[in-house]
């Protein structure tokens, strides 16, 4: 699960650098496009990292086991809960984007978001070696 987060970070950084090079090549007038692309990538990266932490955190699992006995074994319900948190966090980040970035480029946000979301395919193709 953390491999997806790492690939999302790498692809977000890569697409942000490509956007920065493109903006610099055109005279450097629209640096908000670079911020928009980076924000779009972070709109996928941060919720995925929160979900990965929630699903892999031993401290959180202990707390859930103590608070809700028997619920920790319901792994599908836990996964669905964290998936809901992730979706709500993505929506909240996209909704608040105009407040954080002046002269927001929605096309840049979408490009960053889509590139970061495609990391799921990249993670599936470039799998780490299996543990023995």
Image: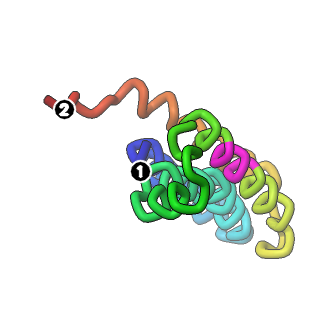
Q: Nearer the viewer, residue 7 or 15?
A: 7
Tell me where residue 53 appears, x and y as whole percent: 48, 57
* The magenta stretch spans residue 93: no
Question: Which residue: 67% across, 62% down?
Answer: 39
Q: Nearer the viewer, residue 118 or 93?
A: 93
Indicate whether 79 appears above or below 18. above
Indicate whether 22 appears above or below 74. below
Left or right of 60 on screen, residue 35: right
* Location of mark 1 (residue): 6
How far apart are the two marked residues, 1 and 2, measured between alpha carbons? 19 Å
Mark 1 or 2: in front is 2
Tell me where residue 100 appears, x and y as whole percent: 78, 75
Q: Is residue 28 visible?
A: yes
Asked which quadrant contains residue 29, the reply is bottom right
Query: Counting residues from the N terminus, which is met first, the one under dot 1 or under dot 2?
Result: 1
* Location of mark 2 (residue): 131
Numbered disc 1: secondary structure: helix
Left or right of 38 on screen, residue 123: left
Indicate whether 101 appears above or below 45. below
Question: Which residue: 51% across, 64% down?
Answer: 63
Residues rendered magenta in the picture? 81-87
Indicate whether 80 appears above or below 12. above
Graded by Cα atoms within 10 Å as few (under 14), some (14 to 19) or many (20 or more), the crowding at tag 2 reads few
């Amino acid at each position: 699960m953390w491999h997806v987060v790492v690939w999302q970070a790498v692809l977000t950084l890569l697409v942000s650098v490509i956007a920065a090079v493109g903006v610099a090549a055109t005279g450097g007038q629209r640096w908000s496009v670079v911020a928009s692309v980076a924000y779009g990538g972070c709109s996928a990266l941060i919720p995925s990292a929160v979900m990965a932490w929630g699903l892999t955190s031993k401290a959180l699992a202990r707390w859930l086991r103590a608070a809700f006995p028997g619920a920790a074994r319901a792994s599908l319900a836990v996964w669905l809960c964290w998936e809901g948190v992730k979706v709500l966090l993505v929506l909240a980040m996209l909704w608040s984007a105009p407040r954080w970035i002046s002269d927001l480029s929605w096309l840049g946000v979408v490009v960053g978001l889509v590139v970061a979301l495609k990391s799921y395919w990249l993670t599936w193709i470039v799998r780490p070696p299996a543990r023995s």
